[in-house]
Image (cartoon, helix red, strand yellow):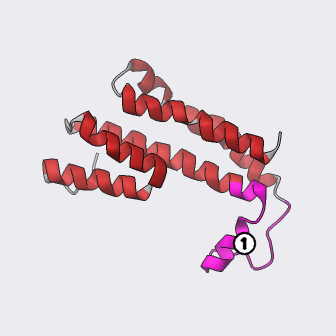
C-alpha cells in the first residue's frame, strides 16, 4: 500500500472519532472507542512503518533549525509519519478537552468550536479551550 493510500485511510479514518467527541460526547461507545488506546494502537503500526520504511535521513536534517526540520519531511513516508503524529496527538488533546469540560460542567455547545479548532489547528484549539474554561470557571490549572 502506498504512502498516499495510507494517508487517506488514516486521515479519514480518524474523523469518526472526532464526530463522536462532537455529536455523542456522553455515549458509552465514545468512551470505549475514543477515550481508550485504540487510535494509537491502530495508527502506531502505520507510523512505525512510515518511519522504518523511509530511505534514510537526508543530509542536513536536524532538529536544530527550521531548515533542518523541513529536510526530514522530504519523503512521502516521513511526511506521512509527521501527519499521523498530528492526528494522534490532536485527537488525544481533543479527548482530554472533552473529559476536562465534562468534569468541570462546561456546556458542550461551547466546547464544540474548541474541538473543531483542535482538529484543524491543534494548539489554537487547545488555547481556545483554555480561554473558554478560564472565562467560564476562572481556572488556569491543568491539574486533573
Q: Is residue 38 above or below residue 87?
A: above
Q: Name the residue that disc number 1 marks.
A: 71
- Does residue 37 appear in the picture of this structure? no
- Does residue 52 appear in the picture of this structure? yes
Is 60 situated left or right of 104 in this image?
right
> In front: 56, or 75?
75
Q: Is residue 10 above or below residue 136?
A: above
Where residue 71 appears, as percent x and y from the top left, is 72, 72
Where residue 131 appears, as percent x and y from the top left, is 24, 56
Is 4 situated left or right of 103 in this image?
right
Tell me, yes or no, whether the highlighted magenta stretch contains residue 63: yes
Where residue 98 appears, as percent x and y from the top left, is 34, 38
Tell me, yes or no, whether the highlighted magenta stretch contains residue 15: no
Q: How many discs mark residues in the rendered view? A: 1
Q: Residues within 10 Å of mark 1 (few under 14, many from 20)?
A: some
Is 50 situated left or right of 105 in this image?
right
Q: In this picture, which residue range is highlighted in magenta?
A: 55-79
The N terminus, quarter of image: top right
Where residue 88 appears, as percent x and y from the top left, is 55, 45
Tell which residue pokes out farthest to the top in this image.
Answer: 28
* Residue that appears at 27% across and 54% down: 130
> In front: 15, or 137?
15
The C terminus, quarter of image: top left
> In front: 36, or 125?
125
* Residue that appears at 40% across and 32% down: 21
Tell which residue pokes out farthest to the right in this image.
Answer: 55
* Residue that appears at 48% across and 43% down: 91
Instruction: Examine the image and state in which quarter residue 103 appears.
Output: top left
Name the secondary structure under disc 1: helix
Is 38 situated left or right of 5 in this image?
left
* Residue that appears at 21% across and 38% down: 106
Amino acid at each position: 500500500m502506498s504512502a498516499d493510500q495510507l494517508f487517506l485511510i488514516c486521515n479519514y479514518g480518524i474523523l469518526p472519532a472526532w464526530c463522536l467527541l462532537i455529536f455523542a460526547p456522553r455515549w458509552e461507545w465514545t468512551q470505549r472507542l475514543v477515550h481508550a488506546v485504540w487510535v494509537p494502537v491502530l495508527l502506531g503500526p502505520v507510523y512505525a512503518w512510515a518511519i522504518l520504511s523511509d530511505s534514510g535521513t537526508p543530509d542536513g536534517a536536524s532538529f536544530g533549525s527550521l531548515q533542518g526540520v523541513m529536510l526530514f519531511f522530504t519523503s512521502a513516508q516521513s511526511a506521512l509519519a509527521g501527519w499521523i503524529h498530528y492526528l494522534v496527538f490532536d485527537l488525544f488533546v481533543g479527548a482530554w478537552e472533552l473529559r476536562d469540560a465534562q468534569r468541570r460542567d462546561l456546556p458542550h455547545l461551547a466546547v464544540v468550536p474548541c474541538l473543531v479548532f483542535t482538529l484543524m489547528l491543534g494548539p489554537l484549539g487547545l488555547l481556545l479551550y483554555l480561554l473558554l474554561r478560564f472565562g467560564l470557571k476562572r481556572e488556569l490549572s491543568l491539574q486533573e
